[in-house]
Amino acid sequence: MLSIILYSNMNTTRRKFIKISALGLGGVATTTSVINMFGSNSVIEGLAINNIEKKYKRTATYCEICFWKCAAWAYTDEEGKLTKIIGNKDDPHCNGRLCPRGTGGVGMYADEDRLKTPLIRTVVNGEQTYREASWDEALDLIATKFKAIKKEHGAEALGLLKHGCPGAHFEHLFRAFGSDTMAEPAYAQCRGPRETGFALTFGSWVGSPEPTDIRDTKCLVLIGSHIGENMHNTQIQEMSEAIDRKATIITVDPRLSTAASKSNYWLPIKPATDIALLLAWMNVLIEEGIYDKKYVEKYATGFDELKEHVRQFTPEWAYGITTIKPEVIRKTARAMGAASPSVIIHPGRHVVWYGDDTQRERAIAILNALLGSWGRRGGFYFKEKINVPSFPHPPYPKPKWNWEELGEKYPLAQMGITTELIRASIPHKDNKYPVKAWMIGGTNITKSIPDKKLITKAIDALDFLVVIDTMPMDVTGYADVVLPECTYLERCDILRSATNREPNIAIRLPVVKPKYNSKPGYWIAKEIGMRLGLDDYFDYKDMKEVVEWQLKELGTSLEEMKKIGVKKYPRKSGPLYLVESEEHEFPTASGRIELYSHDLKDLGFDPMPLYTKHPEPPQGYYRLNYGRAPMHTFSRTVNNPNLSALKDENKLWVNPKVARIIGLKNDQKVWLKNQDDIISTFAIKVRITERIRWDSVYMVHGFGHRDKRLTRAFGKGINDTELISRIFVDPIMGGTGMRGNFVAILTENPHKNIEV
Amino acid sequence: MRYAMLIDTLKCVGCSDCVVACQTENDVPMGYCRDWITEVVNGQYPNLDLELKSERCNHCDNAPCVRCCPTGASHKSTGGIILVTANECIGCGACIESCPYDARYQHPEGYVDKCTFCHHRLEKGQLPACVSVCPTNCMYFGDLDNPNSEVSQLLNNRKHKTLAPEAGTKPQVYYLL
């Protein structure tokens, strides 16, 4: 039996205990006098009285630590000090229960390593460094550079890389200035293939939050989707309900993920063979006649082609590829068939794996279609959202080219492709769409984009780079100008409006004043806009005025929203599920669910998914898999004092067999070298566990920070992204497949002369 | 009244939200914690069992920390909650050594600190912070003396265990299996 303590600081407690015990008595003496002030014997009772007497104020906000954006109440005491953040009970994103990151939001505000004032790159004694600057100086410089670039190359040459709420303000600024050259890693480095794959099949994106009706499902199938390690709040909550209701959970994962450990069936698949399993499942459903015949007949097209297509893909065929036994494939397919239509083959979220990802997502979508789950209770519900009106402004000028032209090589890309924007920033002869400057907001792009060579080359070639962030993330080190944004707890922001069962909006109001010399994203965008002569596009005093106007348009008010935080509206688009007695037109070309895709066929792609073999690790190398930890979001939270206390480094998961061969011990520091001889900057501690296969290693993404200004995160663990240099590009939508990189484990420090 | 906490190991994902919520609710100093997550893996790939769970003071009926405390600072309070009276605590650490669950730590101010079942919240009719925040809803809290309480019902109907029962401490934190 292996037992370890995870995510706690009990070990440090022990160490500190020894250090502090010598001071114990002195400490007690001081404590006594403090406690007596409350006229009580016990600290606890003292605290209780203290809590009751203190007048706490609560302010409505929604979380910005991940994209789920749960609505919450932030509490401040009578001195105005932020004390805690609690979920809003009326919010369908969280139902009053935040995840560890949301609860730990206080740490994002408190982090003493935050960016404090604008910085401008300068040269002192021949060395590049940053100097502190005033907001006026920094904003004037940005405006001057932007105007010069527009004059010489057109506004289109200004590229925006963004994520989250700050992105929205800069999008507006860019569009007003004439640029729609924008992209975010959320598409080509994350969920793009599933949006394209599902759009090709059902005519709709999956979107976020996913419209998976887990709360009522009878069978949940997860394929490389790590609910429980990702903390997509509603999904976690509903999966927990599904466990209570004894729904069947099937998890396909080469690693015993948390979700796998909660499942009725764990299919420990050989990595990179998922499509073979999906095809075999289709084969069983069709051959055994246990698919939803009525649904397929009524709503789908291309069934005969599909039937013919999957005939050859028997469970016996898939066994040799996936290592999953035929009887397990049949048994699990029958479990899905029995639960149909209340079954969910989960589309996943970070799905850029091997370059055939849109086809894998198509296979997932087709399987859902066979089971009749799209638009059915316990499958996928029809989502709805509130359209928040834009604050009045003149129409945006039309750029000569935009993100669509940048991604023209990928005909079915539905959002900007970061890697194409990056490529367009590297000067070359045939570059039709040269990008000369970037603004980066809310994304640590150097850690989310693989192929470091490419991004470094682009950054080197840029005329100008502005980064807006709350923390001195790696990417800020490349900027010409760094602007410190205040955290979500210190600003009014755009209204949250996301798709859900019940359409709703949530408000974010400032809980505390901005710390240091930081400013809200909307203020930064407006100030730059005014300097660019875009006054008409920013015809308001502040965000509060915008939000107040929007709330009025939506039939509510700031006063009401201050009290409730979240407002739900009745549905207008019709019922949550398909109505059996009525016709339904799907928003595809044929108006039906497309099992066979003419769109793909016409563009020269496979109209139905096929399994292709992917490279396997050579001798002495292991497949590098990466994932999430529940208390961290990407690379953005590792320095948060509350969250880094739970997990301040990632570890390298290694199967005991591999550990034996190499001679590894738990917590031994090792370095990694990938197939292209790229060696990790830092070391990582080994974690020997049966939870991983012998042909793979695993680590949580987002660690190995190189910036010393991140005092808690610097040098802790390995940055998986720097080892991902071989990219498998999805020819359909431009996604960057990242799961085909292999690493060797080095036990000696390869950086001989560098102290790491 | 007999307060008890139940944690459903079938639902706990070990996210550690309970740890953060406790820290912000109880002002636990950085670097310390009153609750924590453990992971136990049994078997060999791919025949594996994984148990994740949240642990804390077990508020034992037969509490060694109370018995060994030389000043009486560690005591049993309403509903069987084990508390430490800070200004009676001399920081000798005997209770820390006696606890089979490693649930106590010495606060930087000298006294010994640990989970209180959020006794100050119970007084206001609220659940402990960890129970109220858990996104998987895997934690339950209530009165075992009341046969109709949710916790009594769950213990009647579900397989469960306590930690280190061989220590004879009669823990009041139960794990549903």
Image (spheres, coloured by chain):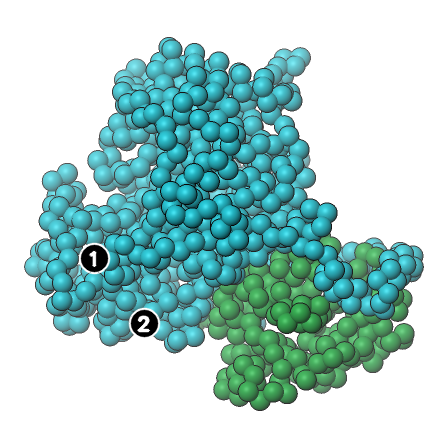
- Identify residue type, mark 1: Ile
Q: Which residue is mark 1?
A: A366
Q: Dividing the picture into quarters, in which one does residue B29 lie?
A: bottom right
Q: Position of residue A59 (x, y in %)?
A: 58, 50
Colour of chain B as rendered? green
Return the residue found at the far left: A304
Quarter of the image for the N terminus of chain A: give it.
bottom right
**Label 1 residue SS:** helix
Q: Nearer the viewer, residue A64 or A582?
A: A582
Residue in the picture at 55% in, 39% down = A491
Q: Which chain is cyan?
A: A
Q: In the rendered image of this protein, does residue B41 appear above or below residue A598?
A: below
Q: Which residue is mark 2?
A: A218
Q: Dividing the picture into quarters, in which one does residue A550 lie?
A: top left
Relative to A186, A670 lies left or right? right
Question: Do pointers 1 and 2 mark residues of a single chain?
Answer: yes
Q: Nearer the viewer, mark 1 or mark 2?
A: 2
Q: Nearer the viewer, residue A130 or B5?
A: B5
Q: In the rendered image of this protein, does residue A217 appear above or below residue A140?
A: below
Residue in the picture at 28% in, 23% down = A398
Q: Dividing the picture into quarters, in which one does residue B155 lie?
A: bottom right
- Asked if marks 1 and 2 touch (Cβ < 8 Å), the reply is no
Q: Dot 1: within a 10 Å radius of its alpha carbon, few (fewer than 14), some, or many (20 or more) residues? A: many
Residue A70 in sight in this render: no
Residue in the picture at 17% in, 52% down = A586
- Identify residue type, mark 2: Lys
